[in-house]
Image: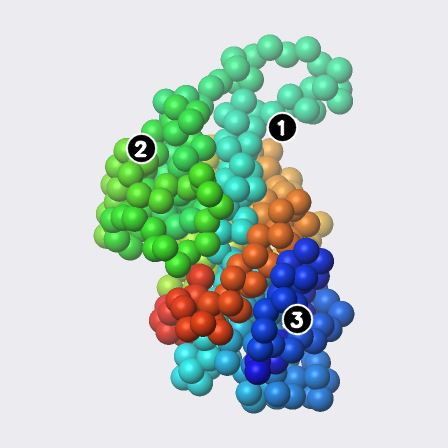
Amino acid sequence: MKNILIDVKVNQEKMKELQEIEGINIEVVEYREKSRIIPKDILKDKNILFCMFPPRNFADLDTIEFIQVNSAGYGQLLGLGLAEKGIRACNARGVSNIPIAEWSMAMMINLARDMKSMMRNQEAKIWDRSARFQSEIRGLKLGIWGYGAIGRETARLAKAFGMKVYSMDMELPGSIRHDIYRVEGTGDPEGKLQDKAFVTGEENKFLKDLDFLVISMPLTNNTKGLIGKEELKALPSTAYVLNPARGPIIQEEALLTALKEGWIAGAALDTHYYYPLPADHPLWELPNVVITPHISGSSLSSHFMERSWDIFVQNVKRLLSSQPLLNELSQAQLEGE
């Protein structure tokens, strides 16, 4: 018998499916958006945890075997010693691929046509048909740094728009693993959509001709601050940077300087260095920046709960039948590499 603790919003349809699985007991706690202390008696004898953030008194989960987080990012699991304790963990990779990729497409069109200025013109009742409002993205070069699930769905949409797609990752893209969650018909499962593929050590070659750079990688010890002055200066001055991944992947001061001094044309930022972004932060005032409040793939999107619960229910079934889990994190990932 496996005892499950659920600390996420409940999807009633998937909960019914979970309740039909034999060999489990289920306990649900009222969901909170931040990590908190959960009473020790609730954590007692729990084997499986479904959560966004592990409880602050994680050490009281002394019988835990498996954790499912309902986010693609898994930084909240680092430092818990899961790998050394033999605790398995999975993330929600694949749940937000579609909305994040759509956000990136929307931002590219937004930036290419300077929609921000057009909206201001509308508010000021200014009739301006300047050439900068009439650009198109077909034929432009999109660089995707991190060719995982989100990057591959972004590539699929970009190719439909007639863009050229360059990928950048630690190794050349291949077929995706069958144990990764993917909505049918999305992404680039064979890893063949990109026009050019670059690997670690070829950053300058990757960056030098881009019109848009989309950051699509998790925040780890290795990716924090990965993009700094050298990388931003390697981009053409006409290029735009889009970050729907994590703010600190790009060095803050380097990004501010790049935007102010014209190393790049502008940026669309959905992830930030502070939450919420302070009212006096200089990014708010820069005319070449579009800011969104981390909503490109948020938990309030229409399919988030359905998809994250689908992964969890499938993983409970897989765990009980000793099958490979969906989106299982490796020991290296759990150690922040």
Q: Give the residue type that dot 2 points to.
A: Asp
Quadrant, the C terminus: bottom left
Q: Nearer the viewer, residue 56 or 97?
A: 97
Q: Secondary structure at mark 3?
A: strand
**Marks 3 & 1, CB-CB < 8 Å contact:** no
> Is 49 on the left or on the right of 241, as rendered?
right
Identity of the residue drawn at 68% across and 56% down? 13
Residue 336 or 267: which is nearer the viewer? 336
Of the image marks 1 and 2, the number of the one nearer the N terminus: 1
Res 137 → quadrant:
top left
Q: Which residue is mark 2?
A: 209
Name the residue beneath numbered marker 1: 116
Q: What's the CA distance linking mark 1 and mark 2? A: 25 Å
Q: Which residue, given by chain and number where applicable, does mark 3 sit on?
A: 6
Callout in the foreground (3, 1): 3
Residue depicted at 60% across the width and 33% down the height:
287
Q: Of marks 2 and 3, which one's residue comes earlier in the chain?
A: 3
Decide if residue 205 is on the left or right side of residue 322: left
**263 relative position to 199: left or right:** right
Residue at (75, 22) in percent of width and height: 123
Q: How many residues crowd around disc 2 within 10 Å: few (fewer than 14), some, or many (20 or more)?
A: some
Residue 269 visible in the current orientation: no
Q: Which mark is residue 13?
A: none
Residue 256, image x, y percentages: 51, 46
Q: Give the residue type that dot 1 points to.
A: Lys
Q: Mark 3 belongs to which amino acid?
A: Ile
Image position, residue 73 (x, y; %):
51, 60
Whole-angstrom CA distance, mark 2 to mark 3, is 47 Å
Give the image location of residue 97, x and y in percent: 50, 46
- SS assignment at label 2: loop
Quarter holding the N terminus is: bottom right
